[in-house]
Image: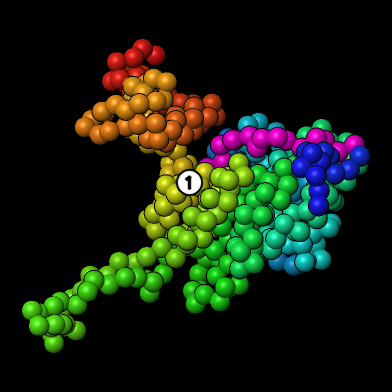
């Protein structure tokens, strides 16, 4: 057993001290690119500022013969790009692959000063995070890094799901967790054949029409409304709780049907409302959707400022637009206010809309901004 006192001690001599709190940096869209694809790589410098996170993908979707090119390509891109406020992440190959060790060694020793987060696929339990934690510390010490590289786990195995709480709390490096619906579906032996999103067969159906003495014999002919259900509700909700209890951040993962922008938006919004802070984007089309969905609506921001202002010290109860607001709804509104303020700092257009919303909300509550 490790003493709690040692939890925040560096795991290698000369490695940076672990963070006590994971910074809430906006990360609405984590945009995946393949650094071995020259056409895609050439676009990266122009995407700085367009997405909150640029992620060089080394794992699935990169062919085995391109693994080395992807790794080296990412080093080149990172060295030659000024990322400004945009974060640089990388999804490394899985711990049971022949590529992980070279991935982590090459990236940390060459571009560790530019790399904010490494995403680890197919995490099974806390032991996987402990392994990554130690090796990162050794490499950080070797590279002379001054700030720790954070770790993000992908939730994509049944065992990982069963251990999600201990994964979230396995290291002070843990920054967040993403849903990996494609691998998770395969590992659970679900009968879907797609990357994320719903399935038309997973539904509930209204009861059959009834007569006074029982079920209508013609019930089979009577149309009965059906509603598609969310395959990922349980998984996302549990991931959100695990992250919240450990002060780290939950994310939706990939939505593979690039043409279905409506389905994608719905899936992203469900995740946002349940507590996720962002999602992966696999195509430029999905970036606009993610930025919009994971930024609170200005009308919600206005309402949030109104409630927070009207509630003063946050205790008691007030009526706003005919609804009772109290300590608990005030705390929900504070979450929205905090997010709006964080986004205003990196997104000037949104910042203007939120400034107007803030003024209006405070004025409605009879306060002054
Ligand atoms: C992502 O990696 C997934 O498997 O869904
Ligand atoms: Mg996967």
Asked if residue 1 is among those painted magenta in the image, a careful observer would answer no
Where's the C terminus, which quadrant?
top left
Residue beneath the point at 27% across and 72% down: 205
Q: Where in the figure is residue 197, as x and y percent of width and height?
A: 45, 62
Is residue 163 rendered to the left or right of residue 237?
right
Q: Where in the figure is residue 69, as x and y percent of width and height?
A: 77, 57
Residue beneath the point at 58% across and 61% down: 180
In the rendered view, tell whether residue 181 sits above or below residue 147: below
Residue 232, can we see it?
yes
Asked if residue 30 is among those painted magenta in the image, a careful observer would answer yes
Per the picture, the main secondary structure of the magenta-coloured stretch is loop
Q: Where in the figure is residue 360, as x and y percent of width and height?
A: 32, 21
State the count of labels. 1
Number of other residues with Cα within 10 Å of mark 1, as a class: few under 14, some 14 to 19, many 20 or more:
many
* Callout 1 secondary element: loop
Q: In the picture, residue 253 is in which quadrant?
A: bottom right
Residue beneath the point at 54% across and 26% down: 345
Residue farthest top in this picture: 368
Is residue 199 rendered to the left or right of residue 79?
left
Q: Where in the figure is residue 78, as x and y percent of width and height?
A: 74, 41
In the rendered view, tell whether residue 277 sits above or below residue 23: below
Badge 1 is on which residue?
275
Residue beneath the point at 47% across and 61% down: 234
Residue farthest bottom in this picture: 217
Q: Nearer the viewer, residue 88 or 304?
A: 304
In the rendered view, tell whether residue 110 sits above or below residue 182: above
Residue 143, can we see it?
no
In the rendered view, tell whether residue 237 sits above or below residue 296: below
Q: Which residues are magenta?
A: 14-38
């Amino acid at each position: 057993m490790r003493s709690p006192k040692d939890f925040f001690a560096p795991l290698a001599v000369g490695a940076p001290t672990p963070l006590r709190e994971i910074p809430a940096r906006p990360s609405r869209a984590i945009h995946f690119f393949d650094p071995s694809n020259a056409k895609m790589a050439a676009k990266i410098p122009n995407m700085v500022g367009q997405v909150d996170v640029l992620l060089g993908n080394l794992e699935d979707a990169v062919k085995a013969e391109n693994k080395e090119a992807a790794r080296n390509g990412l080093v080149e891109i990172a060295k030659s790009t000024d990322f400004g406020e945009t974060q640089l992440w990388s999804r490394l190959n899985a711990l049971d692959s022949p590529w992980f060790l070279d991935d982590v060694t090459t990236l940390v020793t060459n571009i560790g000063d530019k790399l904010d987060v490494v995403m680890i696929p197919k995490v099974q339990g806390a032991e996987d995070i402990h392994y990554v934690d130690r090796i990162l510390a050794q490499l950080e010490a070797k590279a002379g890094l001054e700030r720790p590289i954070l770790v993000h786990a992908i939730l994509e195995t049944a065992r990982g799901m069963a251990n999600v709480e201990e994964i979230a709390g396995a290291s002070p490096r843990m920054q967040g967790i993403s849903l990996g619906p494609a691998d998770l579906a395969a590992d659970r032996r679900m009968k879907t054949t797609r990357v994320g999103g719903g399935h038309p067969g997973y539904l509930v159906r209204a009861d059959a029409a009834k007569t006074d003495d029982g079920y209508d014999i013609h019930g089979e002919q009577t149309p009965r409304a059906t509603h598609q259900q969310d395959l990922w509700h349980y998984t996302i909700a549990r991931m959100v709780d695990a992250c919240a209890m450990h002060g780290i951040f939950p994310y939706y993962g990939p939505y593979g049907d690039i043409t279905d922008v409506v389905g994608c938006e719905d899936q992203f919004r469900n995740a946002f409302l349940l507590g996720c802070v962002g999602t992966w984007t696999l195509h430029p089309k999905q970036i606009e959707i993610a930025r919009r969905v994971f930024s609170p609506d200005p009308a919600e921001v206005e309402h949030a400022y109104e409630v927070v202002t009207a509630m003063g010290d946050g205790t008691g109860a007030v009526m706003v637009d005919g609804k009772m607001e109290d300590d608990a709804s005030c705390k929900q509104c504070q979450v929205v206010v905090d997010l709006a303020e964080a986004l205003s700092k990196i997104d000037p257009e949104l910042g203007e809309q939120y400034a107007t919303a803030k003024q209006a909300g405070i004025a409605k509550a009879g306060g002054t901004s």
